[in-house]
Image (cartoon, rainbow, N blue to C red):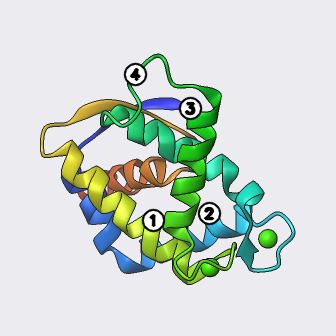
Amino acid sequence: MSVELLDGSMVLGFIEDEQAFNTSIEDRFASLDSDSDGRLTYDEMAKELMSLSVLGSHFGGMDEPSVSHEEVVQMYQDLFEQFDKDGDGMVDLEEFRGEMKEVMLAVANGLGFVPVQMVVEEGSFLKTAVERELAITQQIFFD
Ligand SMILES: [Ca+2]
Ligand SMILES: [Ca+2]
């Protein structure tokens, strides 16, 4: 975990950079797919669902302190179903890519254009978006 300064244009730039975004999606998918069968089960997705629910809480999704364990489980299951478009109980790469794009667009819209400090997890999409932006900035600076 680290605290980074993020704004909407940074996240949008990352989504629109198709090659960087797809590579990052494929890496993330592969690291979640612990049995490497090319599909993510609910258990394999759990880690990602947790980091997405942190995003949700940042944007007012889960700020009530009285959320019960059952409600949290229900929220993860709802999130998983959002990914699993064809409802076969597994999330494939296309489903994962499609939904992550939606989530990241929602994050970009939620952030707006005023940079905010956010706690980002190592290897997460937001972390990659920050690293990409830094690399571009350094390139401009050193050229
Ligand atoms: Ca799997
Ligand atoms: Ca599916």
Residue designated by label 3: 1
Which mark's residue is nearer the viewer, 3 or 1? 1
Residue designated by label 4: 64
Vertical order, 69 against 89 (above or below) = above
Pointer 2 local density, CA inside 10 Å: few below 14, some 14–19, many at least 20: some
Q: Quadrant of residue 136?
A: bottom left
Looking at the image, which is closer to me, 51 or 41?
A: 41
Which mark's residue is nearer the viewer, 3 or 4? 4
Residue designated by label 2: 28
Q: Secondary structure at mark 1?
A: helix
Label 3 and label 2: CA atoms lie apart by 16 Å
Q: Contact (CB < 8 A) between labels 1 and 2? A: yes
Q: Secondary structure at mark 3?
A: loop
Label 3 and label 1: CA atoms lie apart by 20 Å
Looking at the image, which is closer to me, 109 or 73?
A: 73
Return the x and y of residue 11 as percentages of the image width and height.
30, 56
Quadrant of the frame with the N terminus: top right
Three-letter amino acid code at the position of disc 3:
Met
Q: Earlier in the sequence, mark 3 or mark 1?
A: 3
Label 1 and label 4: CA atoms lie apart by 25 Å
